[in-house]
Amino acid sequence: MTDDALLPLIEDWHRALVVVAHPDDIEFGAAAAVARWTGQGKTVSYCMVTSGEAGIDGLAPEECAAVREAEERASAAIVGVETVEFLGFPDGVVEFGVPLRAAITERIRRHRPDIVITGNFRETWGGRSPNQADHIAVGRAALHASQDAGNRWIYRDQLIDGLQPWSRVRQVWAAGSPQSTHAVDTTDTFDAGVASLTAHRAYIEGLGWEDFDPAEFLEGMSRPTGQRLGVTHAAAFEVFSMGFGE
């Protein structure tokens, strides 16, 4: 182990909800972790705030949305995720605020997860390059929606047809955060994570990354993280506890 060792994530949970801004966000580093958890018999569901319709310069948004939604569903299936939902917020201009918090809160109340997983919502990835605005907005909203979901007096219009508040989100995990303190061993599921990213073929080609190698890219993150956890490959997460005062 190294001086900047990471702690292992808790894994005594049953349901997780992944809330990210775009199709492909979870595949750029954390899909192998999802494959590990579904392989353990856990239920993981995906919620995409946008359909990524502004992500391919050569495709009009309407066409792009259909392509990217299809790629995300195929990508999710590779790592054992059956439920993929899209909230329909506009790609590239997602704003942090009550409408976004409310939409995510409704999904949390519906899926009743033990753990909510989102992406890095810090200002950077640990260097000087800024994070993307949608990532920041969605990650912050997912964190606060995990609090909102248990309060029956917030978004009361959602509590119809049997939908109830959900106050049992134990933790929120932000994948790839530069302030990560925890990680999970993805050595046995690394190849599944690579296949899941590779499934975003149209998106990667649309970026013009002709020589992009998904395995090489993911290894660049998973091996250093694995070293900090004492394994070959790992995915890192910043952990936020939903317990009062923790």
Image (cartoon, rainbow, N blue to C red):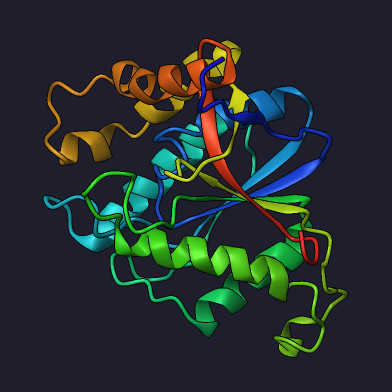
Q: Residue furthest front?
A: 3
Looking at the picture, how far across and down is residue 161, in whole percent?
84, 78
Give residue 199's quadrant in the image. Answer: top left
Q: In the picture provided, is 29 more to the left or to the right than 210? A: right
Q: Quadrant of residue 108?
A: bottom right
Question: Could you tell me residue 134's position as x and y percent?
Answer: 36, 63
Let me know if residue 79 appears in the view: no
**Residue 52 higher or lower than 13, as above or below:** below
Which residue sits at x=37%, y=71%?
94
In-image side of 87 versus 112 (left or right): left
At x 27% / y 53%, what residue is drawn? 64
* Residue 64 or residue 28, whichever sits in front: 28
Mark count: 0
In the rendered view, tell whether residue 153 sits above or below residue 219. below
* Residue 205 spot, x, y in % from top left: 18, 34
Residue drawn 30% across the image and 16% down it? 216
Of the 4 image quadrants, the one containing the C terminus is: bottom right
With respect to residue 116, does 182 lie above or below? above
Q: Quadrant of the N terminus?
A: top right
Residue 242 visible, this angle: yes
Q: In front here: 230 or 55?
A: 230
